[in-house]
Image (spheres, coloured by chain):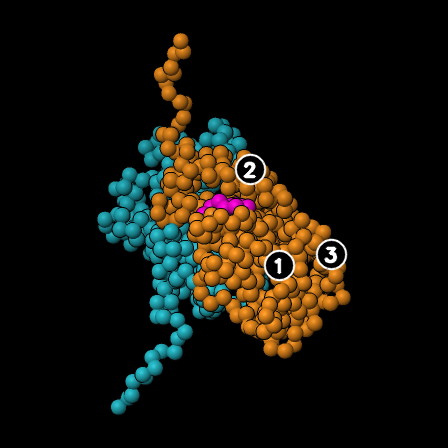
Chain colours: A orange, B cyan
Amino acid sequence: MQIPDMQGPVCPMPLKHENQIVMGHGSGGKMSQELIQRVFQSEFTSDALLAGNDFAYLSSDGGRLVTSVDAHIVFPLFFPGGDIGKLAICGTVNDVAVSGAIPRYITAAFILEEGLDIAILKKIVHSMQLTALEAGVEIVAGDTKVVEKGKADGVFITTTGIGFVPQGRTIHGANAQPGDQILISGNLGDHGIAVLAARGDLGFETGVQSDAAPLNHMIEQLLQAAPNVHVLRDPTRGGLATTLNEIAAQSNVGMLLDESSMPIQQAVRAASDMLGFDPLYIANEGKVIVIVPPNEKDAALQALRAHPYGKDAALIGEITSEHPKRVLLKTFIGGTRMLDVMAGEMLPRIC
Amino acid sequence: MQIPDMQGPVCPMPLKHENQIVMGHGSGGKMSQELIQRVFQSEFTSDALLAGNDFAYLSSDGGRLVTSVDAHIVFPLFFPGGDIGKLAICGTVNDVAVSGAIPRYITAAFILEEGLDIAILKKIVHSMQLTALEAGVEIVAGDTKVVEKGKADGVFITTTGIGFVPQGRTIHGANAQPGDQILISGNLGDHGIAVLAARGDLGFETGVQSDAAPLNHMIEQLLQAAPNVHVLRDPTRGGLATTLNEIAAQSNVGMLLDESSMPIQQAVRAASDMLGFDPLYIANEGKVIVIVPPNEKDAALQALRAHPYGKDAALIGEITSEHPKRVLLKTFIGGTRMLDVMAGEMLPRIC
């Protein structure tokens, strides 16, 4: 007969603290250290982090320094094809990569809601580390804060990226020229529909997966093949239509898009139709808009399609000198309509 | 007689959107753009931000690149001597400066709660810009997200700082040597007590102001006067005691502090006594610990005291080879007690 252990578990804190976030995890003291060791240091192993300072020394690759920041508040935390951790790395890696830079470093700050299961946090942190490894970026600095139950929503993650632009690259939202061709690296609207489905807001199954992906390696292949790319940008919140409007305004050019060439998978089109959404305004998290001079269009398309994340890449329109700062769409039925910036909120908390 | 304007105000949105944060402000579309123009672009005027990309090109000063990140969740948003905006700049500027770097750039991400008064947000953003100007840092990239009422608490601000270490400086938490002298740049515990008072948790008036301040200029003066400083660190969450324990562990040294030399103002001591707190564990937001070889102690103290933020600087102890990784305090009454890392949560949401 086995004798029960009368001492109980040898743990310094009540069970609750072992499994859930409590305010003490945000104290900056012993419990914060334990949380960092248990959850973060087992995944994030940068020398800069392990040095234990509140700052990280970085190596410069040479080239122009670039940074970008995004707060991530997606709800729910997990959705088909991704989670808030993957999203937090992809979003920032992609924002740095569309500058023409090679992303190298990430800082990550976590705002945790009291009561969050530590198992959920571990899953998110693991997902971040997997995505960082794929992208080849190092998580070099971090911070963790805790707020009372009901003062946040599970986890919010803010990531800042740092990268370096190799000599000779000048990619910028203001560089689009009349005659340039507009490419998109794949199907539109997958992320938004996947998150909506995860919320149960659709009322039906779609099978659509978020496209969340780190695009830096694909972009690097693209820039090797088409070194004179003028503009790169990832169409996240506000979707393709809003992002193209931003570029049209920055470059003071017009755009003419062809609706029939837009790559949109059938399930996304069907879900959008039922909900009254336009897929051109739905957020993407693993797509890039490429604006390229006509003589490099074919090389660019080929380079995109050679990468798994770009296999559905398509030519979707061109830059015009007419109607500057306006984006027009040639519709299926032969008419033309203006695509404006998204007005209000279509899908809250999508990223 | 003046004829009233029967058309009413020429505004494209209902009044509510004009004065309060709504979910549409987080859409990435038109309302987001309006919010950015109204609230952020009137304060943050970096060329990098105005370029309108999702990334910022930065200039490198040469020297070693350094970064640091902090999420700020202080409650309440405003307190005597500061607010969350000032804190968000000071916290990150100071974390970069204690590496020996000159802080240059800041990224800032805002998580806004639906219903927040835009006037409050403007006040916070203005405070950030004033503090950034004082510190000489540029806010180069930003992001704004909105969550539903009850899913955040007014505003959370995450800031990442980027700076450059001039040639020849090697400041690090692992560099403390036996015999080194331990200095603190001024009075301890002011920030924590000021925030508690603002919450109404004290039940009495204190007149204590937060010490929140950007310390980079004072640190620069210090390093000119005492170029062989071994360690710098700002004692924020967990206070002086927790921060010194971290350094003792990193450097594998002991510390012996002198309680009678601790600069603590009377009002902080009185409030702490009544609440049962130890001021050595209370957060500071405008203080720096300086660990310096004995031959540079006087120059360091003089340099600190020459700066307004360092006028109450004091010598508080020394590094020992005995009892490595332990911080001991020689008490008023002549005994010695161990100062451990703070165990749980003393003052939640202090920064």
Quarter of the picture containing the N terminus of chain B is bottom left
> Can residue A287 be found in the magenta stretch?
no
The type of residue carrying mark 1 is Pro
**SS assignment at label 2:** loop
Residue at image coords 44%, 37%: A118
User: Are labels 3 and 1 on one chain?
Assistant: yes
- Residue position marked by numbered label 3 in the rendering: A302
In-front residue for pair A343/B11 = A343
SS for callout 3 = helix
Disc nearest the viewer among 2 and 3 = 3
Q: What's the CA distance linking mark 3 and mark 1?
A: 16 Å
Q: Residue furthest front?
A: A333
- Tell me the quarter of the picture where residue A243 sits: bottom right
Q: Position of residue B248 (x, y in %)?
A: 49, 35
Q: Chain of mark 1?
A: A
Tag 2: amino acid: Glu
Residue A83 forms part of the magenta stretch? yes
